[in-house]
Image (spheres, helix red, strand yellow):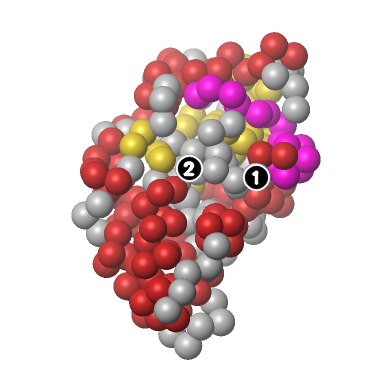
Amino acid sequence: MNNKLNQKKIEVDAVLFDMDGTLIDTIGLITAGHEHTWKKYTGKAPSREEILSKIGQPLQEAYSGMKDPMEMVDSYRSWCSGKTETHTGLYLGIVPMLEELQRMKFRLGLVTSRFREGLVDCLRVYDIKHYFEIIMAQEDSEGHKPGPEPLLTAAERMSITDMSRILYVGDSVHDLESALAAGCRSAIVSWTSMDKEKLKALGPDLWIERATDLPSLLSPI
């Protein structure tokens, strides 16, 4: 993947972001929550790699095939509840990046597979809600990542008909696949906890080394 110095600028109207692992470092909390839940119901937890591979999809997908996946979802959510302030953090440079993108007149949005309750809690703790024109939780679209539905729904609500005028920024294969399926431009953050070489091999339009690099890689249309 080209570095900042030789990546071509991308022309877009809107920049949409994933949240977990992209804007907010929730990965440790998420993996611990899954480990707790799997141990509670099965006596053992999957490997960290298996858990990471599910992050970015709706929570219930992690427990598909189990006797009562929604009961496991409820257990996971109960265990994670109240831990946002103590077990997560905003990645370096996120606020300056959002402020600069806003100054440059890009339309900003948040598109996540999170349930609304957890999303609202994160936005409250880190006080970043006001940067986004649109905020979409799992409940806001019928289909979910890695399908295109969340991004297509966001575009419709923003009255954007040309999907190539949207950049979707994420940290996972599911984010890339969703952007590709929707016809959006795509970017992956270097601070991802996922397999970087695998992500680079999938060919995102941008590889973001530092959050504050992103504005200089974009041009408003």
Q: Is residue 130 positioned above or below 119 on the image?
A: above
Q: Mark 2 points at which residue?
A: 21
> Which residue, given by chain and number where applicable, does mark 1 sit on?
195
Residue 159 in which image quadrant: top right
What amino acid does circle 1 point to?
Asp
> Could you classify mark 1 by the number of other residues whose Cα lies within 10 Å: few (under 14), some (14-19), or many (20 or more)?
some
* Residue shown at 56% from the left, 82% from the top: 65
What residue span does the magenta drawing correspond to? 198-211
Circle 1: element type: loop
Q: Where is residue 189 in the image (x, y as percent from the top left)?
A: 57, 33
Asked if residue 202 lies in the magenta stretch, the reply is yes
Residue 200 forms part of the magenta stretch: yes
Up the image or down, 202 lies above or below 13; here it is: below
Q: For the residue marked with disc 2, what is the amino acid?
A: Gly
- Please say if 92 is above or below 166: above
**Crowd class of label 2 (few under 14; some 14 to 19; many from 20; radius 10 Å):** many
